[in-house]
Image (cartoon, rainbow, N blue to C red):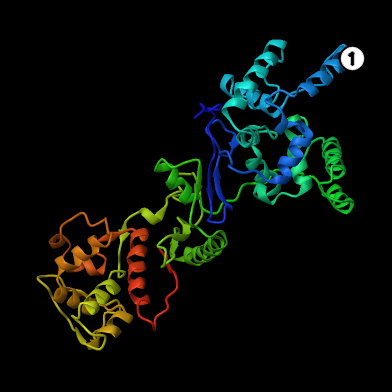
Amino acid sequence: MPQPLFNTPYSSILLDRNNQLLEARIASDEQWRFPPSETLPSSYVTALLLFEDKRFYNHSGIDWLALGRATVQNIKAQKIVSGASTISMQVIRLAANSQSSGDNKRGGNKRTLTTKLFETLQALRLEFSYNKQQILNLYASHAPFGGNVVGISAASWRYFGRAPNSLSWAESALLAVLPNRPNYLRPGKNQQKLKQKRDRLLTRLQQAGQFDQLQLILALSEPLPDTILAFPKRAPHLLETLIHNNKSGLIKTSLNGNLQAQVQSVVNNYAQRLLSAQITHLAAVVLDNKTGLPIAYIGNSGFSHNPHSGKGIDLLHRPRSTGSILKPLLYATMLQQGEITPLQLVEDTPTKFKGYQPENYDLKFRGVVPAKQALAQSLNIPAVNMLKQYGIKPFYDFLKSRGMSTLHRNADDYGLPLILGGAEGTLWEMTHLYMQLARVAQSFPTQSLPAQVFIS
């Protein structure tokens, strides 16, 4: 296995299950440099090789024909007017620049005959250590694309707002020519010269038979990007949590990008409505009941690095009072074990348990009610009676066995208030508990429950 050529840091990027970008964090050297891609779009590769190294697949790092041509031209002009750098030689140059100064801008080091000879020899060595596809990937992932944008993936999202595999011929041609002079030719500056360079390459591609005349006309009419786009911000809390847990680089998730946006919209709407009640933080998670994987993840309503706002906190993993959320779990457990039936009557009368006297939210008593009605109305007194009947320790053990990790005290310390919010739980673990409940319900042919959605 060859030694890595580049020791540069990479951005942390979060992808959904369809490889769509959800979130990104800049690399530690302040460059937008995405982790290297394993594949490159064919249109970009075709445009790049025609522009930079058309005999790439036929040489071993040095294009002797191009070198001879350049030598003759330079001698005639008595100055350097033409180069003969192959893609392999440019990879060596980029690697040397990154290791010596962290400068990924082409031409960052002074060009001399000695450095040219070094690049030539190293290019030969590179060709023996890496295959052609790997060399192309190295170039495309580390080439400069203007400003602090490095690599085709970051450039594609920064300039066009989508992944490289969706690039048009005009966009691929632009990204093929852009590293040639990244600080001089960049979107928003020198637009006319940049367009001329792109259009000349498009014309050569058409003449090479890559597409017909009509496609050329359409490609030439495509405008150049005149601004740098912001990266998507769809799952900031998830990415921050993963980085905090020492996960970085390219992170593929099970999230559904479209659903993520829809849930974010719902959370934002609820957040606005709840502001009048002084509720300023909201979180939501959606799990697929079949796979157990999250398909939407909203760690908080809004995001900010300001520590005083609290918006940077991922609420999904922060313990908070369980409130009444454990009542359905107790009901389901007792039902499954045959300790109650839906129509069994449970007491809803003033009751005191060794000094503890629970009350219903409306401060009313209903005498006796069917168990299913007590659950539907979230009555506190019947829930305490049911827990007393089932047993605090058995229910406590059940919760821990099903993944509730926030029960740090023993069962007796929690006592009967356990069922009314006397314990703390995380939204992440509570949702997984309910997912297990849904799976049990789905085992019955008359039941068909959707994915579990919890908002906290």
Give 110 or 45, whichever is nearer the viewer: 45
Give 313 or 208, whichever is nearer the viewer: 208
Residue at 51 percent of width and 26 percent of height:
3
- Residue 227 visible from this viewpoint: no
Percent x, y for residue 74? 85, 15
Furthest residue in direction left, as rendered: 354
Count of labels in the image:
1
Residue 54's place in the image compared with 117, above or below, is below
Residue 439's place in the image compared with 347, above or below, is above
Residue at 54 percent of width and 63 percent of height:
259
Residue at 49 percent of width and 46 percent of height:
251
Q: Is residue 363 left or right of residue 135?
A: left
Kind of residue indicated by mark 1: Ala
Residue at 58 percent of width and 30 percent of height:
130
Give 22 or 349, whichever is nearer the viewer: 22
Percent x, y for residue 279? 43, 62
Choose top left, top right, bottom left or bottom right for residue 440: bottom left
Percent x, y for residue 417? 20, 67
Percent x, y for residue 236? 50, 50
Residue 367's place in the image compared with 440, above or below, is below
Q: Is residue 11 left or right of residue 368?
A: right
Residue that label 1 marks: 77
Choose top left, top right, bottom left or bottom right for residue 171: top right
The crowd level at tag 1 (other Cα within 10 Å; few <14, some 14-19, many 20+) is: few
Say which quadrant the C terminus sits in: bottom left
Name the element at disc 1. Answer: helix
Give 432 or 62, whichever is nearer the viewer: 62
Choose top left, top right, bottom left or bottom right for residue 199: top right
- Residue 92 visible from this viewpoint: yes
